């Protein structure tokens, strides 16, 4: 039995050749992979540049020694601070010391620090409220609140310090 084929299919007994759909799909996938690779290659250096331009993380570090002056009427406590350029941070330093006779000498000082984006060291003059400071071991505390547009992050550094004569 012979099948009647329409004239537009031709007279060949072989089936018509399929379109090269699989070949086109492979070409499109390859082109897409190259495009994604190019996007990633261009994006990575840009991301690294953004990291290099980001402001440094805020840092607060109370020094290990404070300088005693004016016969114990003041100690100068050094504090190193790094904060975002163009901001101002309110820095507070407190010093507490056990002096002769079981008495406590303590005081605190505060200062507005204009931030440069770089590490900077300031010396705060801490005056005692009851007893004079003496040469020896004390406890020091430094604190700031680094604020952004939506929230504040408290930074604290507290540890034993050595009060030394100048």
Image (cartoon, rainbow, N blue to C red):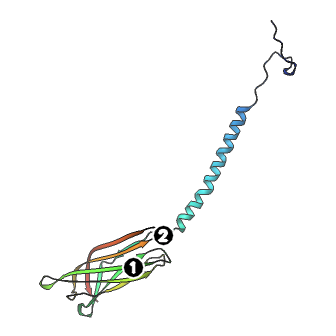
Quarter where residue 79 is shown: bottom left
Residue 163, position as x, y percentages in the image? 25, 83
Left or right: where does residue 51 sit relative to residue 112?
right
Residue at 69%, 44% in the rendered image: 31
Which of the image's four quarters has the N terminus? Answer: top right
Q: Which mark is residue 111?
A: none
Q: Which residue is mark 2?
A: 149
Q: Secondary structure at mark 1?
A: strand
Residue, x 66% and y 44% (percent of image)?
Answer: 32
| Mark nearer the viewer, 2 or 1 | 2
- State how far apart marks 2 and 1 are (Cα): 16 Å
Q: Quadrant of the C terminus?
A: bottom left
Residue under label 1: 90
- Rendered view: 146 above or below 12: below
Circle 2: element type: loop
What residue occupies the far front of the structure in this picture? 150
Q: Position of residue 116 (x, y in %)?
A: 48, 78
Badge 2: how crowded within 10 Å, few (<14), some, or many (20+)? few
Q: Is residue 106 above or below residue 31?
A: below
Within-10-Å neighbours for mark 1: few <14, some 14–19, many 20+: few
Q: Earlier in the sequence, mark 2 or mark 1?
A: 1
Q: In the picture shown, does residue 87 fall above or below 48?
A: below
Task: Count all numbered tags in the image, as a single digit.
Answer: 2
User: Which quadrant would residue 4 be assigned to in this image?
Assistant: top right
Residue 122 percent location from the top left of the image: 39, 83
């Amino acid at each position: 039995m012979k099948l009647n084929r329409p004239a537009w299919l031709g007279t060949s007994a072989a089936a018509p050749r399929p379109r090269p759909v699989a070949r086109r799909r492979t070409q499109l996938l390859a082109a897409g992979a190259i495009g994604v690779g190019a996007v990633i290659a261009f994006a990575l250096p840009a991301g690294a540049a953004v990291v290099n331009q980001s402001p440094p993380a805020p840092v607060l570090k109370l020094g290990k020694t404070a300088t005693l002056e004016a016969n114990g009427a003041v100690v100068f406590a050094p504090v190193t601070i790094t904060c975002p350029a163009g901001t101002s941070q309110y820095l507070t330093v407190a010093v507490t010391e056990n002096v002769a006779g079981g008495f406590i000498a303590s005081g605190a000082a505060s200062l507005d620090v204009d931030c440069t984006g770089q590490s900077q060291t300031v010396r705060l003059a801490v005056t005692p409220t009851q007893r004079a400071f003496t040469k020896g071991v004390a406890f020091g505390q430094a604190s700031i609140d680094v604020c952004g547009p939506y929230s504040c992050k408290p930074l604290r550094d507290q540890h034993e310090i050595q009060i030394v004569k100048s």
